[in-house]
Image (tube, rainbow, N blue to C red):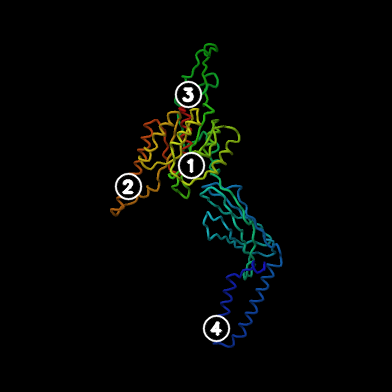
């Protein structure tokens, strides 16, 4: 039974069979062909038996293994490697059908390769998950054919392999040293000029050319009889919270990922930068209630704690309750902190409903509202209009884009900082805003 289940007739066998049937038809017209055709049938059966012996005489004729990462990175290309080992003493052609997790909706996965006798080969492909959670691989099916190509023997490996998909830790590695890089412009991040001296005092040192004359310490200069200056460093141990709106407005998809997942990926990378700058990073999410809370700290295990919390964020995309957010921040965050709020406002009416709560938060904390441009509207605006309906669509699209700029100005009027960004630029823009606030010393 196991033998029957693993044996598959190849297309080449059926082509030969069709040829023999065609010759039998011709034998009705040319009777002399009849015996020759039967001889051809015997040859086909002989080679079929020989092909079966070649593939089945060796119990472990072929081995394969699927090598997956310990976890997948959401929104990024993740490499999946396949190791193939041919134990046959002749070259084989293999057809690989890997049962990819259903979330990818890939129904035509197929790789065809040829391996020499006793050859080992490694091949790979990439997967880009677009949602967090558990991804279960099915069977790794390998169909092996000998040079006769009449049948295939099916080998099965790696049954029921589960890999979790976490927020984008690949981006985390990419920007790991970003906070300390002197070449930030290569990432598209502007260099920010320092304004003022709201920094922590570090030491008094001798003046060297290029030091700011405004930092001269005249008492130390008089004692040492040489110019001495005060040296400052960035303020440390400041609390930074990232608040993620997981309500209905964050359900909108861009390039396969929802705005919520873009915000989660950005939060992970920004948390790492914050901790590397010696500040305290914390997160929480909110919709109908505030949850998934990690209090702002800078201990060694903080990044792992944040990663696990972000992985477990789940939502039904209800309407978000900003009043509950305001009360929770008032109750649980006593020290003045930087709060980076990931949300989305499409219209001024949507902002005005929540503005009293945002103003209340901004009274006690430095609030940065991060929301998104609808990049799909650009295609409508840039499209040439030929009909009245297309003109209407273009005017409405321009109105929505203009309202986004009005939202920025409205927030600025009440001392609330904002970042209006495209989803794909969210991580860079959020890091840039944090570094700007640190450089200006306004927290």
The label shown at residue 25 is 4
Residue at image mark 3: 198
The label shown at residue 103 is none
Spatial distance from mark 3 to mark 1, Cα to Cα?
30 Å
Residue at image mark 2: 396
Dot 3: within a 10 Å radius of its alpha carbon, few (fewer than 14), some, or many (20 or more) residues? some
The answer to whether the residues at label 4 and label 2 have Cβ atoms under 8 Å apart is no
Residue at image mark 1: 263
User: Which residue is at the front of the view, 66 or 407?
Assistant: 407
Q: Which of marks 4 and 3 is in front?
A: 3
The answer to whether the residues at label 2 and label 1 have Cβ atoms under 8 Å apart is no
Residue 277 in picture, x, y percent from top left: 54, 31
Q: How many marks?
A: 4
Among numbered discs 1 and 4, the one appearing first in the sequence: 4
Q: Which element type, helix, strand or loop, lies under badge 3?
A: loop
On the question of residue 318 being in view, the answer is yes
Residue 60 in picture, x, y percent from top left: 70, 62
Position of 66 with respect to 419 (left or right) is right
Among all residues in the image, which is located at the extreme left?
Answer: 388
Residue 407 in picture, x, y percent from top left: 37, 38
Q: Which of marks 4 and 2 is in front?
A: 2
What's the residue at 32%, 50% (across, down)?
Answer: 393
């Amino acid at each position: 039974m196991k033998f029957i289940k693993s044996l598959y007739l190849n297309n080449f066998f059926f082509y030969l069979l069709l040829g023999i049937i065609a010759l039998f038809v011709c034998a009705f017209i040319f009777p002399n062909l009849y015996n020759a055709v039967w001889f051809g049938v015997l040859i086909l059966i002989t080679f079929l038996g020989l092909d079966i012996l070649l593939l089945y005489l060796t119990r472990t004729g072929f081995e394969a293994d699927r090598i997956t990462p310990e976890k997948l990175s959401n929104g990024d290309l993740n490499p999946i490697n396949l190791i193939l080992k041919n134990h046959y003493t002749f070259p084989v052609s293999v057809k690989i059908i890997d049962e990819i997790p259903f979330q990818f909706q890939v129904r035509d996965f197929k790789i065809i390769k040829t391996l020499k006798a006793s050859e080992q080969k490694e091949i790979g492909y990439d997967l880009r998950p677009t949602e967090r959670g558990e991804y279960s691989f099915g069977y790794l099916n390998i169909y092996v054919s000998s040079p006769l190509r009449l049948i295939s023997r099916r080998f099965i490996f790696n049954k029921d392999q589960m890999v979790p998909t976490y927020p984008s830790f690949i981006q985390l590695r990419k920007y790991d040293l970003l906070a300390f890089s002197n070449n930030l412009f290569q990432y598209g991040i502007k260099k920010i000029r320092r304004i003022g001296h709201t920094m922590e005092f570090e030491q008094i040192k001798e003046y060297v050319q290029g030091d700011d004359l405004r930092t001269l310490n005249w008492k130390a200069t008089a004692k040492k009889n040489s110019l001495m200056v005060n040296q400052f460093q960035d303020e440390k141990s400041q609390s930074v919270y990232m608040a993620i709106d997981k309500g209905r407005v964050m359900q909108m998809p861009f390039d396969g990922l929802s705005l919520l997942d873009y915000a989660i990926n950005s939060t992970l990378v920004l948390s790492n930068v914050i901790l590397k700058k010696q500040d305290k990073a914390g997160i929480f999410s909110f919709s109908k209630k505030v949850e998934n809370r990690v209090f702002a700290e800078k201990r060694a295990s903080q990044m792992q704690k944040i990663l696990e919390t972000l992985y477990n964020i789940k939502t039904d995309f209800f309407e978000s309750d900003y009043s509950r957010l305001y009360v929770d921040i008032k109750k649980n965050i006593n020290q003045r902190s930087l709060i980076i709020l990931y949300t989305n406002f499409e219209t001024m009416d949507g902002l005005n409903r929540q503005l009293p709560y945002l103003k209340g938060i901004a009274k006690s904390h430095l609030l940065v509202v991060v929301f998104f441009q609808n990049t799909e509207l650009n295609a409508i605006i840039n499209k040439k209009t030929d009909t009245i309906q297309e003109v209407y669509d273009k005017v409405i699209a321009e109105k929505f884009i203009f309202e986004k700029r009005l939202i920025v100005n409205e927030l600025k009027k009440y001392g609330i900082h904002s970042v209006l960004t495209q989803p794909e630029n969210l991580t860079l823009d959020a890091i840039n805003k944090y570094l700007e606030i640190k450089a200006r010393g306004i927290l």
